[in-house]
Image (spheres, rainbow, N blue to C red):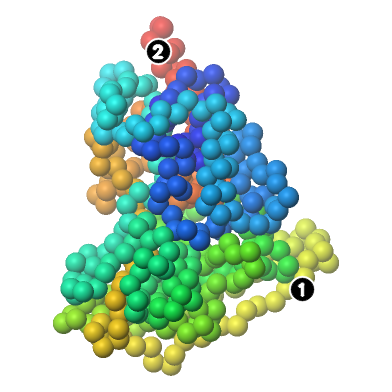
Amino acid sequence: MIIGAGHAGLAMSRCLADRSIDHVVLERGDVANSWKTERWDSLRLLTPNWQSRLPDFSYEGDDPDGYRTMPEVIDFLDGYAQTISAPVEAQTTATSVRANDSGYRVGTDQGEWQCKTLVMAMGACNIPNVPKLADAVPAGITSVTPMDYRNPDQIEDGGVLVVGASATGTQIGDELHRSGRPVTLAVGEHIRAPRLYRGRDIEWWMDVAGVHDERYDEIDDINRARRVPSLQLAGSPERRMLDLNALTDIGVKLCGRFVGINDGKAQFSGSLANQCDLSDLKMGRLLNTFDEWAAENGIDDEVDASHRFDATRIEASPPLGLDFAKSGIKTILWATGYRPDYSWLDVDVFDRKGNVRHVGGIVDAPGLYLMGLQFLRRRKSALIDGAADDARDLSTHLAAYLDENAAVAGS
């Protein structure tokens, strides 16, 4: 059984079908439910169209270097599900999972299922990860998460504090500021990246240079790697670079990490300069990797000349506080990431932080697997493009597990 009919669950379904393994895909809504119901209107994929490669399915249009809109992503995944004849049970929400002698008993709002193996392919973006300090937001200020946000029209006129400067925070902050709502961006850890480098999309470089294919067992601190924020990228038709400099150029104000609220005033860390310096350093190291690969593979003459970008510009003394009333802030948008929802999983596989214990997606329980999480087996695991390789690996392990158990039962 697979829970989740997004790109990860569908990729696993295809791999299981190729191995003639009977299965069903449970989906709480319809295929691509999260893309249909939990994304803002203007969002485009961060990856180019050519990079949407699922098992036996890829982009065949006339704009390989473009970035899909949400309706296009939905059509792509709906088309994939139909092409592979995925056995999806739509409008079926998993409510409980318990281990038993035969594998796992899965309770749903449509009845119960029994399965020998279970693949949890819901991804990591189930619940907005809003910090506890949000409880202290003064009355009269509206809190919004990216899961609720659709477009600027739903946001009250007035200032907006966007908390978080990864891809989501920078994209929504840019959109809100251009709508006429003054934006202040609270910046914590982030990774600056250009949309284009030496004339090629950064995702092209990540692909050919092998960065996306780095494996979980090749990383010194995989837990740290799994917490790394997403790149500051946007999939705009103009292929523009959306970093902190681009935001300050249009008037967005920058503050440090949002650390507290006291007496109606927001408090920010004084680490903004250090965070930006570190981000610039990481970007430089990544570009060095690309340059080295280009030189080693003899393509320096096929791409533009190597170059570096101006350092991130910030005020000499960024503000450490902000009075909500005096500043005109009416809304706080918490672009502070997500976490998976395992509230229905009644199996002893959780660590002390509430994360599922696993090694490369193989959970610490017989026949239980994960798909679609950040750096699950490769750096690209959470991308549409990462699902195929992970599904092949994990379906191989799953098939071997079934064969081994069948052999034991027959002995």
Asked whether 189 or 72 is in front, the reply is: 72
Q: What is the three-letter code of the residue carrying label 1?
A: Ala
Neighbour tally class for label 2: few under 14, some 14-19, many 20 plus, Cα within 10 Å: few
Residue that badge 2 annotates: 408
Q: Residue furthest left?
A: 263
Q: Is residue 376 above or below residue 86?
A: below
Residue under the point 32% across and 56% down: 128
Q: Position of residue 388 (x, y in %)?
A: 57, 39
Asked whether 22 or 328 is in front, the reply is: 328
Sequence-first disc among 2 and 1: 1
SS at mark 2? helix
Residue that badge 1 annotates: 305
Q: What is the three-letter code of the residue carrying label 2?
A: Val
Neighbour tally class for label 1: few under 14, some 14-19, many 20 plus, Cα within 10 Å: few
Q: Is residue 236 above or below residue 245?
A: above
Task: Give the label, 2 or 1, closer to the camera.
Answer: 1
Query: Which mark, by number, is residue 229?
Result: none
Residue under the point 34% across and 62% down: 145
Residue under the point 48% across and 68% down: 171
- Quadrant showing the N terminus: top left
Q: Is residue 290 above or below residue 315?
A: above
SS at mark 1? loop
Q: Position of residue 309 (x, y in %)?
A: 62, 79
Q: Residue furthest bottom?
A: 316
| Side of 230 relative to 108 (left or right) | right
CB contact under 8 Å: marks 2 and 1: no
Q: CA distance from mark 2 to mark 1?
A: 61 Å
Query: How many numbered discs, if any?
Result: 2
Q: Position of residue 280 (x, y in %)?
A: 54, 76
